Amino acid sequence: VTAVGMREWANLMFSAALRRQQLSKQSEIGEGTSVKVTFDGKRRFELDGGVKGKAKELEFEIRPRSLFVCAPSD
């Protein structure tokens, strides 16, 4: 999710309410059974709404329909 400012967040939320967030310019959606995220340096990350620390790389195995990952796009 790359939304910045009230207008972009409102657009993204409206798209999500219509279940068409894949059409929003402020989101990128993908599917798979594993996800690997690599940053240019250590970044703070959260799991279930709680800060867990800092990492340069995160790797996840995913059960079908059990995880949604939001990350900034370049």
Image: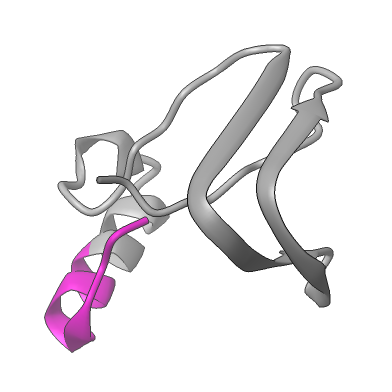
Q: In this view, does 32 lie to the left or right of 40?
A: right
Magenta region includes residue 10: yes
Residue name at image x 62 percent, y 13 percent: 32
* Rendered view: 25 above or below 28: below
Q: Give the range drawn in magenta.
A: 1-11
Q: Which residue lies furthest to the front in this view?
A: 41
Q: Residue furthest top?
A: 33
Q: In this view, does 24 lie to the left or right of 57?
A: left
Question: Tag count in the figure?
Answer: 0
Q: Quadrant of residue 65?
A: top right
Q: In which quarter of the image is the N terminus?
A: bottom left
Q: Specify how the rendered protein is coloured.
A: one colour
Residue 34 drawn at (x, y percent): 72, 17
Residue name at image x 58 percent, y 37 percent: 37
Q: Quadrant of the C terminus?
A: top left
> Of residues 3 and 42, which is closer to you in this image?
42
* Rendered view: 71 above or below 20: below
Residue name at image x 55 percent, y 39 percent: 38
Residue 53 drawn at (x, y percent): 81, 71
* Rendered view: 64 above or below 51: above
Q: In which quarter of the image is residue 42?
A: bottom right
Residue 12 drawn at (x, y percent): 28, 61
Main secondary structure found in the magenta portion: helix
